[in-house]
Image (cartoon, rainbow, N blue to C red):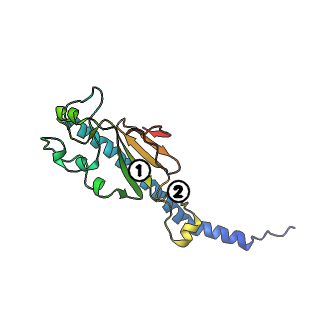
Amino acid sequence: MSKPRRISRAVLAALLLAVVLGPPVDAMRSRVSSNESAAIGDIRTVIAGQATYSSANGTPIVEGQPNFEGGLECLAGREACIPGYTGAPVLGRPFLDVPSRRGYTFTLHAGPAISPGALKKAGASTSTVHDFAYVGVPDRPESKYPDGIVACLTGRRNSTGKRGFCGDGTGVICYTNDGSAPPVTSGRCEPCPDKIY
């Protein structure tokens, strides 16, 4: 009759750690996922806000190209940006006042400028552009600050997000898997590594 196998102390300790630390690791992953969802939501809000703003921002300057805003100030409350505009701001103040939210930092990249004469003729804001890109990157990307046992043992929250995001006037959101900022060319997320539709 064979003897029952003994479990080594090292294996037993590893199993105990997995049971004890499993929930904190899951909580960290859940937080990262929540941060990413919020970042995508914020980018979609800016895209929608730019579309709303464009419809009130003068007459078309160049056929087929909308009149987007080159800065967040006009989108979040400066009614004087569009001559004669009396409507409500298209974005809330946090988009302007809090560029870092829920573990992500956001930046608006304006596209090519339009001549002052064309803007005046169209009755558009003096900071109107034809393209824009809104980029969100994690403050602590998972590629550089991995979550895991060390983070649990030290009580430090390491990563705040896994992917970097970019949305523009086309309505498409691009992302990178390492948390770096997707490339921006002339106010567009180009080239687009991967897309969320």
Mark 1 belongs to which amino acid? Gly
Mark sitting on residue 181: none
Counting every numbered tag in the picture gives: 2
> x%, y% of residue 166?
41, 44
Mark sitting on residue 142: 2
**How crowded is the residue under tag 2: few (<14 C-alpha within 10 Å), some, or many (20+)?**
some
Q: Residue visible at 12% across and 41% down?
A: 84
Q: Where is residue 85, by image quadrant?
A: top left
> x%, y% of residue 90?
23, 46
Q: Nearer the viewer, residue 145 or 30?
A: 145
Mark 2 belongs to which amino acid? Glu
Which secondary structure lies at badge 2? loop
Q: Which residue is mark 1?
A: 136
Q: Is residue 184 left or right of residue 118?
A: right
Q: Give the answer, above or below, for where 87 lies relative to 99.
A: above
Q: Nearer the viewer, residue 5 or 112?
A: 112
Which quarter of the rendered picture does the N terminus lie within?
bottom right
Q: Where is residue 125, by image quadrant?
A: top left
Q: Nearer the viewer, residue 3 or 109?
A: 109
**How crowded is the residue under tag 1: few (<14 C-alpha within 10 Å), some, or many (20+)?**
many
User: Among all residues in the image, which is located at the extreme right?
Assistant: 1
Q: Residue visible at 22% across and 35% down?
A: 55
Q: How much space separates mark 1 and mark 2, taking CA atoms?
A: 14 Å
Q: Residue visible at 53% across and 61% down?
A: 145
Q: Give the answer, above or below, for where 99 lies relative to 135.
A: below
Q: Is residue 138 left or right of residue 19?
A: left
> x%, y% of residue 71?
28, 47
